[in-house]
Amino acid sequence: MPEKLHPNIEKVAAVLEEHGVTGEIVVFAEATPTAVTAAAQLGCEVGAIANSLVFDADGDPLLVLTSGAHRVDTDLIAETVGAAKVRRAAPDFVRAATGQVIGGVAPIGHPAPLRTLVDVWLDRHETVWAAAGHPHTVFPITFAELVRITGGTPVEVER
C-alpha cells in the first residue's frame, strides 16, 4: 500500500487488524465503484464482490452486504427487519451514516455501528472482496469473518 493512505482506508485497516483479519487492502490505480469493475480488476466472479449498500429503513441506516451478482429486494428486506419502508439511501445519508462515499463504502470503519445484513450467497465463495472505505480499494475476507466483524445477520436479499 502507498505510504500515506486516505483516512477512511487507515480506519478500515485498523478495524481489520483489531479483529485479526489478515487480508491485505488492495489499492487500484483506477476507481472500482461497481462489482463488475472490481471483479474485472481482481479477476474473480462478480458474485464474490461484497457490495456495501446503505438503505434508509424508516429513517435509520441499514447496511446490506450483498453479492455483486444480486439485486436487493427492498420489500423482502423491509419484511426481514420489520420496517414499513426500505429504500436506497441518498448520497448525503450514506456519507452521514458511514463517513464514506458511494462506490467505496466498506462494511466497517463507520462513525457508529450500523445494523447490517449479509447476503448468504457470499458464503458460496472461499474469498469475498469488500470495499475498504475508498473507491480505489478492496480487501479479501471470508464470509464467516465478514459476519463476525460486522455483527451482521446472514439473510437472503432477493426472492
Image (tube, helix red, strand yellow):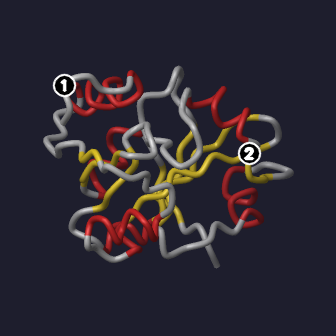
| Kind of residue at badge 2 | Ala
Please state the horizontal and vertical placement of residue 54, each as a whole percent of the image: 63, 46
79 or 24, which lies in front? 24
How many residues crowd around disc 2 within 10 Å: few (fewer than 14), some, or many (20 or more)?
A: many
Q: Dot 1, how many residues are within 10 Å of its Cα: few (below 14), some (14-19), or many (20+)?
A: few
| Residue at horizontal 38 percent and vertical 53 percent from the top | 30
- Residue identified by numbered label 2: 89
Residue type, label 1: Glu
* Relative vertical location of residue 97 with respect to residue 34 in this rendering, above or below: above
Figure check: 15 above or below 126: above
Determine contact: label 2, label 1, CB under 8 Å. Answer: no
Q: Which residue is mark 1?
A: 3
- Quick one: SS at disc 1? loop
Instruction: Residue 118: give x, y in percent of width and height.
Output: 47, 56
Residue under the image location 32 percent in, 43 percent down = 148
Q: Secondary structure at mark 2?
A: loop
Camera-nearest label, 2 or 1 = 1
Residue 154 appears left or right of 101: left
Quarter of the image for residue 75 reads: bottom right
Residue 61 sits in quarter:
top right
The picture places residue 142, in percent across and down from the top left corner, at: 25, 56
